[in-house]
Image: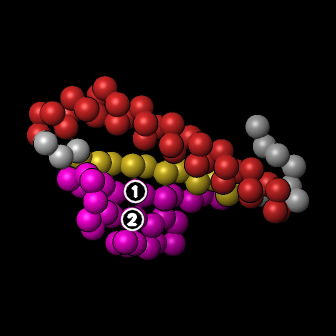
Amino acid sequence: QVARMMSDADLDEMVKGAFASLSHVHEFAIDGSSILMRDTLTWRSPLGVLGIVADKLFVERHMRKFMVKKQSELKEYAERTSGAAPRR
């Protein structure tokens, strides 16, 4: 669910799901002829101390890999459809 939209960012918050809470902020900034996007995920796993341990052992690494893959695919799509030269 989109909780809030602003001119340079928007916030998604989980209403119901596997986490005790989860929010996802998309921030946008113009950098010359490019648009930079930054995603920030904040979550709290269920199950108290067990959730904290799971975060450190598994969840944090999984979320980071997921976001890196998502960003890479989005960048490739944007470059492919805009006709702009890829930025490294």
Tell me if residue 15 is in the magenta stretch: yes
Q: What range of the chain is rendered magenta?
A: 1-30
Q: Position of residue 19 (x, y in %)?
A: 25, 52
Q: Position of residue 53 (x, y in %)?
A: 21, 29
Instruction: Tell me if residue 81 comes above or below residue 47 in the rendering.
Output: below
**Can you say which quadrant of the picture contains the C terminus?**
top right
Kindly identify the residue that appears in the image at 37 percent across and 35 percent down: 60
Which residue type carries mark 2?
Asp
Q: Which residue is mark 2?
A: 12
> Residue drawn 45% across and 67% down?
10
Mark 1 → mark 2, Cα distance in angstroms: 5 Å
> Mark 1, residues whose alpha carbon is within 10 Å: few (<14), some, or many (≥20)?
some
Secondary structure type for disc 1: strand
Q: Is residue 83 left or right of residue 70?
A: right
- Residue at the spot 56% in from the left edge and 59% down from the top edge: 28
Q: Earlier in the sequence, mark 1 or mark 2?
A: 2
Q: Is residue 21 left or right of residue 70?
A: left
What coloring was used for the rendering? secondary structure
Q: Is residue 65 above or below residue 11?
A: above
CB contact under 8 Å: marks 1 and 2? yes
Residue bearing mark 1: 24
Crowding around mark 2 (Cα neighbors within 10 Å: few <14, some 14 to 19, many 20+) is some
